[in-house]
């Protein structure tokens, strides 16, 4: 996406000297079996790369159900949240200022696409997420459009994704830098240019050491809550790295 086409999402428009840097699409091996790094390794790598925080967006799809087979729902969510909770505790104990956000990469059972979900709370996962995999994008959007942000991940990834109906999305991942996939970023950016109300995001889709810190967003203020992330993304007061 050309900077001239990013509207308010331009680094040149962010005038403050201090910039905060976040990766919006990160996996850990504790929950995402395709991941090769523990949450501790991921956090340390991002801190060394100069980031101020990450959103952990572990997979929430059929394989999650298989991985947690035999657990009741509360135990499944305990399992999903454990790497995030462990990271937050370890950072607090060490007195380190680095934000760990609660995200999700959701794939419905009847849909090959992946959707990045932001604005989550632990309470919502315990109380309502047991139904999510059995929904579809339209029903999920209609129920949660005012409570969550639904961003399609890598909409034009070759042989695995296709652009979903934009009527049921808040935005799309404009930049996905996974080195093992052709994510079709230019095609996605053209869609975003044609529909400027949609929210663009950027994420490294980190699974392995070579993925760390390839992209993300930069903001002129700290983003340290899920609510604040939603506000910043809606305001477009950030830049894609």
Image: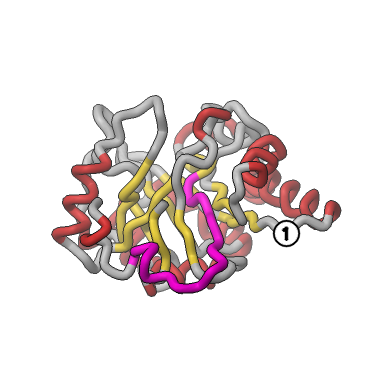
Residue lying at 45% horizontally and 35% vertically, measured from the top left:
62
Residue lying at 22% horizontally and 43% vertically, measured from the top left:
186
Q: Quadrant of residue 97?
A: bottom right
Instruction: Provide the residue designation for mark 1.
Output: 97
Of residues 28 and 211, the one drawn nearer to the viewer in this rendering = 211
- Left or right, 234 with respect to 69, comes to left
Q: Is residue 219 visible?
A: yes
Give coordinates of residue 115: x percent, y percent: 38, 49
User: Relative to residue 205, is residue 81 depicted above or below?
Assistant: below
Give coordinates of residue 100: x percent, y percent: 64, 54
Q: Residue furthest left?
A: 194
Q: Is residue 113 magenta?
A: no
Residue lying at 34% horizontally and 64% vertically, measured from the top left:
9
Residue lying at 24% horizontally and 68% vertically, measured from the top left:
197
Give coordinates of residue 101: x percent, y percent: 59, 56
Question: Please, what secondary structure does the residue beneath circle 1 have?
Answer: loop
Q: Is residue 72 visible?
A: no
Magenta region: 9-25
Q: Residue furthest front?
A: 17
Crowding near pointer 1: few (<14 within 10 Å), some, many (20+)?
few
Give coordinates of residue 223: x percent, y percent: 57, 66
């Amino acid at each position: 996406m050309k900077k001239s086409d990013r509207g308010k999402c331009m680094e040149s428009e962010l005038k403050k000297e201090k910039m905060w840097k976040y990766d919006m699409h990160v996996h850990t091996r504790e929950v995402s079996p395709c991941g090769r790094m523990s949450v501790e390794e991921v956090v340390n790598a991002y801190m060394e790369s100069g980031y101020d925080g990450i959103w952990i967006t572990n997979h929430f799809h059929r394989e999650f159900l298989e991985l947690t087979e035999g657990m009741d729902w509360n135990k499944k969510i305990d399992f999903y949240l454990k790497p995030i909770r462990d990271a937050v505790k370890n950072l607090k104990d060490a007195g380190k200022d680095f934000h760990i956000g609660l995200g999700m990469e959701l794939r419905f059972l009847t849909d090959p696409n992946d959707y990045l979900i932001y604005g989550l709370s632990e309470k919502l996962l315990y109380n309502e997420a047991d139904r999510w995999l059995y929904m579809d994008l339209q029903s999920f959007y209609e129920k949660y459009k005012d409570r969550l942000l639904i961003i399609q991940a890598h909409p034009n990834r070759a042989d695995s994704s296709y652009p979903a109906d934009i009527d049921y999305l808040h935005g799309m991942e404009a930049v996905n830098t996974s080195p093992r996939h052709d994510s079709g970023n230019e095609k996605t950016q053209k869609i975003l240019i044609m529909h400027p109300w949609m929210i663009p995001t950027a994420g490294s889709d980190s699974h392995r050491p070579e993925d760390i810190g390839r992209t993300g967003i930069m903001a002129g203020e700290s983003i340290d809550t899920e609510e604040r992330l939603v506000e910043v993304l809606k305001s477009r007061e950030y830049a894609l790295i």
